[in-house]
Image (tube, rainbow, N blue to C red):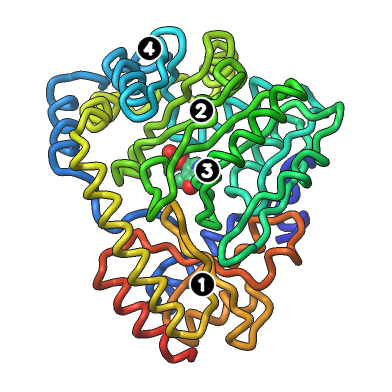
């Protein structure tokens, strides 16, 4: 869309039109297609967690403004979760902040930590709110491109090092990485940490897919690496971990001065949100290991179903080490323009996918890549795979 159709949008946001998800979801509806575009599950999370929300609502817990930093039960549960899974200790009062989903955590962190003109390094392709939030904060984004290497997308550490300048304030990291499915390795994270310490950078790390890592991949929070505890803002979300994306309960863990800074921005965005759901998420975070294992195994089976089907249909399929998504290369199908391909796919095959190019500044670097979400019921994926066979 051009500025003439949005005459009132300011210059900071002029480049950000309607998101691709709106266009593609409308296309899915119009054509009766299976929507593997947007990443939300088509089944809800655990029944007992839903019931916990109902109970909180009925008991009148959280129906009025909850405390600004989040309800104590949830902040305690978030701290316990970081301890239980990663051995990281956070003070629930001074080092935890509940937000309106990870989306607000990202926005509030950037609005709080950036001065106008500060450079922010983000891994490209990036989650769609990053560029807009950096712009709203007056920052300048500096993309470092993840590139295909032996079947998955990898971070080039030399490129990352070269991207740091005297104006770089912050690294905005995302692992497990949406949309590529890459998970940064221990060695990569150690190198990122070393660089952040050496150049005195803050890091905001979006780890919303922390419990969705597959095969021999391992999720390691950057905050656990040497020198990172006090310069890292770690972001999590109940949406992805418990399949309640509509509840919008997210959080930040960081050192007291960083949490205080993020809270300052957050209080003027939503102030608070999701009252009764905060109590339910506190219970969800304390679910036994069996929940997390079963969740991961279920998603792994879905990944395998979709990845195999896409391969059969003629795509090159990148390995998904984490997240909800499979990224494919459409060139074996004789195509090279992901936009054109995704716009035609609903008519051709009755399936909706997202062109990865929308997540790049260097659009040409992402042109042949297309993302499919597998967080859907097995029968939906099976039907999608059946439909995609017509492409081969
Ligand atoms: C879904 C998603 C978010 C947003 O999470 P919410 O809790 O729904 O706001 C943030 N980052 C990434 C990488 C995501 O995929």
Q: Which residue is mark 3?
A: 175
Is 101 displayed left or right of 371 in the figure?
A: left
Question: Label 4 CB, ligand 1: below 8 Å?
Answer: no
Is ligand 1 closer than 8 angstroms to the Cβ of mark 2?
no
- Is residue 266 or residue 259 the one in the foreground? 259
Which label belongs to residue 160?
A: none
In front: label 3 or label 4: 3
Q: Earlier in the sequence, mark 1 or mark 2?
A: 2
How many discs mark residues in the rendered view? 4
Helix, strand or loop at label 4? It is loop
Would you say 292 lies left or right of 344 here?
A: left
Distance from disc 2 to disc 4, alpha carbons, whole Å, reads 14 Å
Could you tell me how far apart the alpha carbons at marks 1 and 2 are, in whole angstroms? 30 Å
Q: Which mark sits nearer the N-terminus, 2 or 3?
A: 3
Label 1 to label 3: alpha-carbon separation: 19 Å
Q: Secondary structure at mark 2?
A: strand
In the picture, measured across the screen, residue 360 lies left or right of residue 45, that is right
Front position among marks 1 and 2: 1
Residue 277: x and y in percent read 27, 30
């Amino acid at each position: 869309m051009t500025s003439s159709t949005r005459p009132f949008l300011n210059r900071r946001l002029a480049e950000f039109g309607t998101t691709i998800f709106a266009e593609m979801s409308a296309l899915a509806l119009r054509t009766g297609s299976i929507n593997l575009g947007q990443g939300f599950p088509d089944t809800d999370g655990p029944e007992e967690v839903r019931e916990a929300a109902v109970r909180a609502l009925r008991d009148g817990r959280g129906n009025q403004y909850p405390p600004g930093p989040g309800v104590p039960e949830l902040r305690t549960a978030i701290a316990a979760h970081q301890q239980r899974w990663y051995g990281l200790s956070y003070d629930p009062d001074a080092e935890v902040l509940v937000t309106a989903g990870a989306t607000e955590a990202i926005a509030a962190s950037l609005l709080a930590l950036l001065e106008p003109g500060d450079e922010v390094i983000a891994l490209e392709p990036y989650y769609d709110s990053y560029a807009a939030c950096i712009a709203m904060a007056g920052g300048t984004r500096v993309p470092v491109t993840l590139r295909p290497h032996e079947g998955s997308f990898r971070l080039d550490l030399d490129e990352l090092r070269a991207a740091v300048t005297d104006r770089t304030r912050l690294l905005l990291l995302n692992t497990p990485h949406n949309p590529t499915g890459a998970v940064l390795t221990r060695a990569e994270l150690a190198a990122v940490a070393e660089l952040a310490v050496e150049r005195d950078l803050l890091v905001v790390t979006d780890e919303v897919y922390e419990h969705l890592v597959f095969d021999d991949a391992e999720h390691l929070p950057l905050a656990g690496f040497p020198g990172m505890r006090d310069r890292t803002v770690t972001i999590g979300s109940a949406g992805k971990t418990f399949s309640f994306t509509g509840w919008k309960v997210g959080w930040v863990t960081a050192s007291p001065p960083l949490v205080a800074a993020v809270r300052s921005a957050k209080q003027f965005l939503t102030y608070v949100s999701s009252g009764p759901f905060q109590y339910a998420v506190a219970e969800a975070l304390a679910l036994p290991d069996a929940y997390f294992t079963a969740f991961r195994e279920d998603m792994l089976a879905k990944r395998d179903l979709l990845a195999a089907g896409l391969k059969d249909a003629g795509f090159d399929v990148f390995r998904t080490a984490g997240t909800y998504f499979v990224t494919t290369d459409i060139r074996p199908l004789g195509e090279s323009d992901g936009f054109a391909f995704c716009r035609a796919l609903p008519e051709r095959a009755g399936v909706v996918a997202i062109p990865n190019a929308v997540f790049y500044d260097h659009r040409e670097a992402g042109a042949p890549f297309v993302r499919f979400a597998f967080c859907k019921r097995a029968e939906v994926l099976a039907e999608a795979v059946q439909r995609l066979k017509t492409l081969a």
